[in-house]
């Protein structure tokens, strides 16, 4: 890779790492796993940078790699890493932490593909066609996954309506 290409890659990676991490965390619900997914995504992007840059599809490629890595990781389930029971207490910005925790916990109960669709559609604001392209699926499959995922979330969160509606 040329020096110019490497500089462009570094600028892109620096600019998009936070956004990719947010997407990864919302899909997997685990801080460390999200970091691993972003690292995998950025490594794959580095290898394919010249090809992807020529097509001007860096964002799409990065999201596709991230989604595929997440789904593949869920499908294989052979991670040798052991989650820890206690996470360092980090203060979140001024947002409703209880609401955030409730939503992340509800998202974690969805199957991986449904979770990816819901996160991409409603938290990343992608169209059905865009999600279908990212996940290498048909728009009909995305609609179906979306409908099932939202139904599951509604059912899970129905008991928390009072908490969710409080100002």
Image: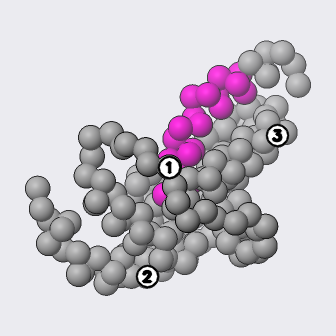
Quadrant that contains the C terminus: bottom left
Q: Are marks 2 and 3 in contact (CB under 8 Å)?
A: no
Q: Residues within 10 Å of mark 2 (few under 14, many from 20)?
A: some
Q: Which residues are magenta?
A: 8-27
Residue 22 placement, left or right of 34: left
Check the image and report above or below for 11 versus 62: above
State yes or no: residue 20 in magenta: yes
In which image quadrant can residue 54 be found? top right
To which residue does mark 3 refer? Answer: 48
Check the image and report above or below for 45 versus 143: above
Marks 2/1: CA–CA distance: 34 Å
Q: Residue at x 67, y 72 (%)?
A: 74
Q: Check residue 88 in the rendering and tell me which mark sits there, or answer none.
A: 1
In which image quadrant can residue 13 be found? top right
The percent coordinates of residue 77 (x first, y second) are 73, 75
Residue 144 placement, left or right of 13: left
To which residue does mark 2 refer? Answer: 148
Which label's residue is closer to the chain start, 2 or 1? 1
111 and 97: which one is in front? Answer: 97
């Amino acid at each position: 890779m040329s020096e110019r290409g490497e500089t462009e890659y570094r600028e892109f990676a620096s600019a998009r790492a936070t956004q990719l991490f947010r997407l990864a965390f919302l899909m997997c619900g685990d801080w460390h796993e999200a970091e691993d997914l972003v690292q995998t995504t950025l490594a794959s992007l580095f290898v394919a940078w010249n090809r992807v840059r020529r097509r001007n599809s860096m964002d799409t490629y990065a999201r596709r790699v991230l989604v595929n890595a997440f789904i593949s990781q869920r499908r294989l389930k052979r991670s040798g890493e052991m989650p820890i029971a206690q996470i360092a207490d980090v203060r979140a910005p001024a947002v409703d932490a209880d609401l955030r925790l409730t939503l992340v916990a509800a998202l974690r109960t969805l199957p991986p593909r449904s979770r990816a669709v819901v996160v991409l559609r409603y938290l990343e604001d992608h169209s059905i066609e865009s999600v279908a392209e990212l996940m290498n699926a048909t728009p009909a499959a995305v609609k179906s996954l979306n409908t099932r995922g939202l139904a599951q979330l509604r059912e899970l969160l129905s008991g928390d309506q009072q908490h969710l509606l409080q100002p």
